[in-house]
Image: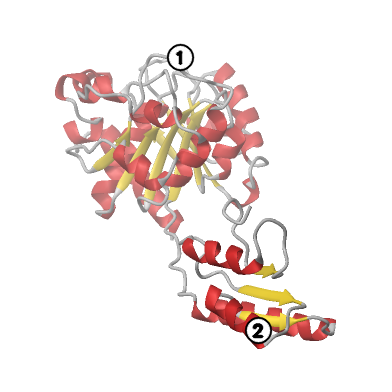
Amino acid sequence: MARAEPPDLIILDVMMPDMDGYQVTAELRKDPQLADTPILMFTAKSQVDDKVAGYDAGVDDYLTKPVHPAELIAHLKALLSRTRARQPAKTPTRVAYTVGVVGCKGGLGSSTLSINLASSFAQLTKTDVIAIELKPGQGTWASELGFTSTDGLNNLLKLKPNEITPVIVEKQLTATAFGVRLLLTTNLSLETDYATLGEKLHSIIQAAAQLSTFVILDIGSPFIPGFDKICSLCKNILVITEPQHSTIKRTRILYDELRNVGAGMGRIINLILYNRIRSEVQLTSTQVSEMLGGTPITMMIPPAPELAYQVSQMNLPLINIQSDSLVAQQISQLARIIQTQIA
């Protein structure tokens, strides 16, 4: 029991069934996890030899019965305070600033924006950036960027949530030439266990957040298991939409939901208008904002079909192919906006 749930303090009696208190103490002291746990021997055996045997076994204090409750409490407090005093101060765990990218449906460009924003932020800040393709069975980054291995996320999903640690996650990250580490996923969905997916993705994000200062999540759409828990880990969410009536209506529902889910009141939500296709028949940015109840548009991303075609040819994000293009400039500006929001 002590190994399963390590206690702050252990109280033993000498007279116990199967093993006496001395034997139990000796066994506890052999366990590295319990070697420093304070042990109080509280017993009716009051002879000097009994006390010596207790201290030899490894108890920290020896108290004989009967005793006033106030004295017992005083001994317990003293043991706990001495233990805390000799424990080294814990180093604060580094937690990354996490940004989620999501649209009201698939096909709005979350994958493209996520990878390009990650690359732009890495260039801007010269810091370590991790981008996670959080869509098992819908992976695109590997094929576009020329990577043959796509098992990073899937390998982690084979583990139990409590087995997913920063060390394990780091082994599944793929390094890139543009300064971003990627957690890639396959485009095969048959192996995905959706019943436990939400809890596992939550553990993966938490572990990855201890490996970097900035993490970008390609969430895709809200139809992923555990969407609310994923959003609760994001300090900033980019909501992508397109200038089409039906999409804007659905985006407003998503936007309102995000303000209420997972402590949404303290979260930054940026609206991104992404024009992926050149068209003369589409809403203006003013019309989009009005349909969203006056919500301001943080950034407009222009269409760049020619650059998009070159991505799979050159195996680089859009912004790394032509850094002076309008789409690259807009994404770089978005990276600067997020940098100011972090501060």
Q: Identify the image quadrant of the C terminus.
A: bottom left
Residue 184 lies, in percent from the top left, at 33, 29
52 vs 342, left or right, is right
Taking the spot 58% from the left edge, 44% from the top edge, the residue there is 232
Counting other residues with Cα less than 10 Å from the Cα at mark 2, is it few (<14), some (14-19), or many (20 or more)? few
Residue 123 lies, in percent from the top left, at 24, 48
In the rendered structure, which amino acid carries the disc numbered 1? Val
| Residue 297 seen in render | no
| Residue 188 seen in render | yes
Taking the spot 45% from the left edge, 62% from the top edge, the residue there is 32
Residue 167 lies, in percent from the top left, at 35, 46
Front residue (pair 39, 98):
39
Taking the spot 53% from the left edge, 61% from the top edge, the residue there is 27
Residue 294 lies, in percent from the top left, at 61, 38
Taking the spot 39% from the left edge, 26% from the top edge, the residue there is 154
Please say which color scheme the image uses: secondary structure
How many numbered discs? 2
What residue did someone put label 1 on? 281
Using the rendered view, name the quadrant where residue 95 is placed: bottom left
Q: Check disc 1 and report its element: helix, strand or loop.
A: loop
Using the rendered view, name the quadrant where residue 38 is placed: bottom right
Q: Residue furthest top?
A: 190
What residue did someone put label 2 on? 78
140 vs 52, left or right, is left
